[in-house]
Amino acid sequence: MSAEEDSQTTESPPASENMPLSFQSPPSDVNFEELLKFFAVGVKIGPTYDLLQMQCIQLINRDYDTLVIDAKGSLCSSYPRQIIVPCAEKYPHPSFSSVSPDLAKALSSETDLHNLFMTSKPARCRERFVVPVFLFNNKVVCRSATLSTYLESVGRQVLSSGRQVLSSVTGSVRPRTSEGSDSVATDSEPLTVEREQEEDEQQQQQPPTQAQELPEQQEVGDQEPMAEPAEPGLEPEEEQVPAAVDKKNLPLDAFARHSDARLMTHLNVGEIFDLMVEDKKVKYMLYCSSSEKVDEYNLYCNFHINCIPYPGCEYFKEVAHNKFNPEGMIFNWEQPAVTSQCQIPYKSNLDIDWSQYKTWDLAQLTQNYLLLILHCLADKNSSAGVLVHCISGWDRTPMFICLLRLSLWADGAIHQSLCAREMLLLTLAYDWMLFGHQFQTRLAAGEPIFYFCFNFLRFIEDERYSVIPSDKADDSSRQTRKGRLSEIRELFLSIYQKAESHGHFAPSHWSLGNAVLSSVRTYLQV
């Protein structure tokens, strides 16, 4: 169902005493101070959440044809209850490619996407699967968590099987698609190995689409080189599993990862940008997560894994103590827990020596990583989409997704019909809060990566971060970009400081349960 159809068939949530009346106004007139207060006390499902979700759908639908998957939280408890999939741009920028028919078809197939979401989600930490968030230059930009460990992946699949058995015993009815069919696979109908093999055989009879040639690998630093991507033009399902591996004999965690790789192939993702500073996250002497960098089954050999290690949210406590000035702050890369090293297989013509990343301060590190992803998105020689992820995908990931979205908007390349207030609402609500950023937990721990993100906009106002070709840019467009980013930053800072001065971020506004839960989440945070 498109967002336009959804907005016509879904009534606005009824007003209630617990819902601030300011939220019932048009998106451009939302009371942002009340919005931040709502986030600070912990996002809860209810009328305010539903209206906020509806406004995000309306804002994205201004510039994109969309598919809204109304999962009601069944796909992932920390994802939006309604997943907004952009299918095509309504106003593509004349300097860049519009969405191809093949990609638009892949993005608009609700049944295929729902099946792939369901079967791939155990492969990712907290079931935070790969999901597209916006389109640009015939490329989809996705976000997710990193790969889960064997225990988490298998445990979640066992729970899913248990729910399947329970559903069969209780006679639960599968949810129906927007077309009225019941063909969407859910926990009651998992995508089995046999079903995947049937799909593989059907796809092998068709010529491959959207195949693109990936550049050769470039090694940076002293890390051992990763495996070369498979030759382009092979059937995607054949590329993901080496010939020596029989899919019937894949262990449960590898089966979920195989579905994960299928999902990324379906979305035409080719470049993975991994922000983790570890190969595998270790907490209390146990592995809490894995990553594509250490894929023992070689299921991700067809993707470029760009390792761009970036400090975790705990580092931003030090940034806050430095009055949020990232200049001169150099992360300690010699810590035992830091095992990942910068490695960029994507070939760019950027004049950046990636082997020097350990000498960069936080400002330069953030700028160079953002510049790399923007350059990849603007590359006209490749149609490979992008996946950005950290560990859980709710701190560093939304920061870079937000910076990418705002930078492209400032260029007039995406979301052309949205004003600054509407863009701020969209990024705050969708990129950060509805996708599970633990704002309350970060406030309690003094790790304001959320604040840092918007305050950092002053460091990317320069035309160097613009994707508009130099021959198409002029002084007016440069000033427009700078003015837009400055307006977003100043608007956010004024709202944030006002909410803070009114005590909306004080623990006294939290319930006892929320305060305890926040402390536990901080302690167990991965």
Image (cartoon, rainbow, N blue to C red):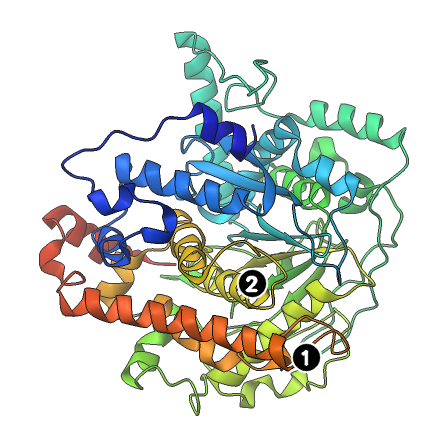
Quadrant for residue 489, please give it: bottom left
Q: Which residue is situated farthest in the front direction here?
A: 476
Q: Nearer the viewer, residue 79 or 31?
A: 31
232 and 80: which is toward the camera: 80
The quadrant in which the N terminus is found is: top right
Which of disc 2 and disc 1 is earlier in sequence? 2
Q: Is residue 245 visible?
A: no
Dividing the picture into quadrants, the one containing residue 389 is: bottom right
Q: Residues within 10 Å of mark 2 (few under 14, many from 20)?
A: many
Q: Is residue 472 above or below residue 42?
A: below
Could you say whether the residue bearing mark 1 is in a helix, strand or loop? loop
Q: Give the alpha-carbon distance from disc 1 to disc 2, as whole Å.
A: 17 Å
Res 176 seen here: yes
Q: Is residue 218 left or right of residue 33?
A: right
Q: Quadrant of the C terminus?
A: bottom left
**Residue sitting nearer the eye, 81 or 57:** 57
Task: Check residue 409 in the rendering and tell me which mark sits there, or answer none.
Answer: 2
Amino acid on which disc 2 is placed = Trp
Rendered location of residue 238, percent (x, y): 82, 41
Provide residue 411's location: percent of width, then percent of height: 60, 68
Give the labeled residue for mark 1.
474
Q: Position of residue 29 (x, y in %)?
A: 32, 52
Query: Is 326 displayed left or right of 69 in the figure?
Result: left
Q: Residues within 10 Å of mark 1 (few under 14, many from 20)?
A: few
Residue 146 in the image, given as x and y percentages of width and height: 53, 54
| Disc 2, SS | helix
Q: Amino acid at mark 1?
A: Asp
Q: Residue at x 16, y 54 (%)?
A: 515
Numbered tag placed on residue 312 in the rendering: none
Residue at 83% x, 68% y is: 216
